[in-house]
Image: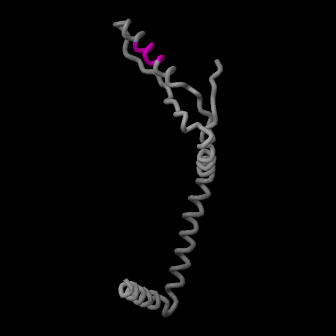
Amino acid sequence: PVIESMSFLGYCVNKLSLEEVVLSDSNHTQENSTDTNSTQMSTDVSIPIPSKATSRGSDFFDMVMADVTLSRYVIWGFGCGMALVLGIIFLIVIQLPGVLSLFVWSSIVVIQLALVAA
């Protein structure tokens, strides 16, 4: 059997209309209700994507989300790696004589000036 599909966020998604889902669900319910000895069975049917989400206007969003999905490991790697490197550099710089007191007193002066200016 051939199922029509489309590209969505870099994945192949089947095109299933809402009428097909409702009809298959109602047919399944009717079949189960006629047989009193059978147990209620559920079918896995994917929820169709609204036509607004598959229009040409969302192609840009689809491409952006596909790019973010593909580059998530690079984003996490640089985010954690750069935070670690900059944190170590800050700890080394703060140990230099006079730097810590310069940071503390300059922040006190800047906060006082901001409060006076407001």
Between residues 39 and 115, which one lies in front from this camera angle? 115
Read off the magenta span: 23-29
Q: What residue is shown at x 37% (from left), y 83% (from top)?
A: 118
Q: Nearer the viewer, residue 26 or 81?
A: 26
* Depicted 56 relative to depicted 113: above or below: above
Q: Residue at x 61, y 50 (%)?
A: 64
Q: Position of residue 7 (x, y in %)?
A: 63, 36
Q: Is residue 74 above or below residue 118?
A: above
Residue pictured at 36% horizontal, 88% vertical: 116
Q: Residue furthest bottom?
A: 98
Residue 57 position in % (x across, y down): 60, 43
Nearer-the-camera pick, 103 or 38: 103
Furthest toward the left, the residue is 36
User: Is residue 73 positioned above or below 85 on the image?
Assistant: above
Residue drawn where x is 40% and y is 14% of the image: 29
Q: Main secondary structure of the magenta part?
A: helix
70 in relation to 42, above or below: below
Q: Horizontally, is 86 left or right of 27 in the view?
A: right
Report which quarter residue 51 is drawn in.
Answer: top right
